Amino acid sequence: MSVAFRTPLPRQLHPARESLYHELHARPFPVIGSPVRISHLALLLDESDREMDFQHLCALCTRYGVNPPAAHDNSFYQRLGDLDVRWERHLEFVTYTFIRPGRNESPFSQTALSLLPQDWLEAVPGQLVAAQHLEVRSPDDELLDREKLAACFEGQRLVSGRLMEGAATLWSAFRLHGDGCGRILLHNHGLNDNQTGRLILRVLELETYRLMALLGARPARDLAPLLRQLDQQLAEIIAELSSTEGLEEERKLLQQLTRMAAQIERHRADTISRFSATQAYYQLVMKRLEELKERQSGPNFTLSAFFSRRLTPAASTCDSVSQRLEDLARRIERAGDLIRTRVDLKLEEQNRRLLASMNRRSRLQLRMQETVEGLSIAAISYYGISLLRYLFGALEPLGVPLNKDIATAVAVPLVVGTVWWVTHRIKKFIVEASDPERENPR
């Protein structure tokens, strides 16, 4: 008997360490024998529906007396009476897969959904996107002829494929039938239970991801005419810009571009997640087709040909519309930059002319100021000399030997020089007081 010894580990463990180990085993392939009848539902959920969906699953477990899943679980597998249920939570949708062993005499006459409580089934939260009935027939069952296949699929045109290198054959119309669900018929030619479970899971994922990818097709088709209209408006604005000269007209064009840019950003916000999801789901569909290892079988469409002709154009349309949105947004931005540049240049030209006009007025004011300054010096000097003449005239009666006229003549240059010097000192003081660079020298 061997004894396992516990190896010491570092004390600090990452909080998500155990979940990282469990992540690869969160959704194991089911082990399913044939014959079997399977019903598969995929429902689109928003944030408010996710908790309601979990509680609804717990209510189903309570009805059958089994333990419900834990609150943090993203997958749950349990036996409910004669059914096996597989519940898986994805990023934006949740899937229910109900597995009922056994076969019907006529395919799809008794489905797995018929064993579920109808009130519970009708109240499942979310928006139903995919609803599939899949039936697997065992190698011992006889192959269905064309008439029986037509009866199983209500006469709709079938797509068939030899899967797993010929070990199984698939038939489906990939359309809704009278019960509101799609139908897929698989005939097992020699797969074991593990291989059958993996094949069933891949086929169900193929159909679920196909429908999820197509969710972006309608918004893309609705948006394409609007993008053509916006593209034409942008071309008209650019053509009008080449002949526009007035600043007010350019401002109106800039306002139109701003409204167009806001409209484009709104459409981008509404569709970017959907278009990105479409591309992701499309890649998953192509990957599942590769994993099915299909061979050509008869005159019918193969799965690869069917999806290449029907799904690829829809995914390409979503990608094209998404690229047109991005391209239109960049073109509107460039046109807006061009108009703003022209407006800025014209504003700069107006400012330059305004500054030139202000310089001319400043020079004129300076000349007028200098003229007034000269007149002021002359007037002040005249009054000063007049006062000195009165003073000289008063000194003569006092016996001062002074000639009034000669003294006045001598005083003229002194008075004028003094007035000029005082005036310029006052002017210099005012200029220095109003110059901030002189107040704060570097």
Image: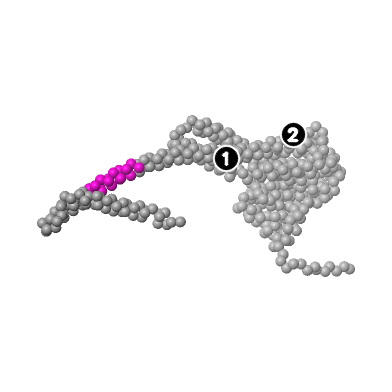
Q: Residue at x 86, y 44 (%)?
A: 190
Could you tell me which secondary element the residue under label 1 belongs to?
helix
Q: Position of residue 94 (x, y in %)?
A: 68, 50
Whether residue 386 is visible, yes or no, is: no
Q: Type of residue at label 2? A: Arg
Q: Is residue 82 above or below residue 355?
A: below
Frontmost residue, 393 versus 34: 393
Could you tell me which secondary element the residue under label 2 belongs to?
loop
Number of marks: 2
Q: Residue at x 67, y 40 (%)?
A: 214
Please name the residue that numbered disc 1 is placed on: 329
Q: Type of residue at label 1? A: Ala
In which quarter of the view is residue 235 placed?
top right
Q: Position of residue 203 (x, y in %)?
A: 76, 44
Whether residue 279 is visible, yes or no, is: yes
Give the CA distance from mark 2 to mark 1: 43 Å
For the rendered model, the colour scheme is one colour
Q: Position of residue 321 (x, y in %)?
A: 62, 38
The extreme right residue here reads 1
Q: Earlier in the sequence, mark 2 or mark 1?
A: 2
Quadrant of image for the N terminus: bottom right
Q: Residues within 10 Å of mark 2 (few under 14, many from 20)?
A: some
Left or right: 57 in relation to 147: left
Left or right: 417 in relation to 231: left
Please name the residue that numbered disc 2 is placed on: 157
Residue 256 among those drawn in magenta? no
- Which residues fall within the magenta stretch? 363-381
Frontmost residue, 97 versus 37: 97
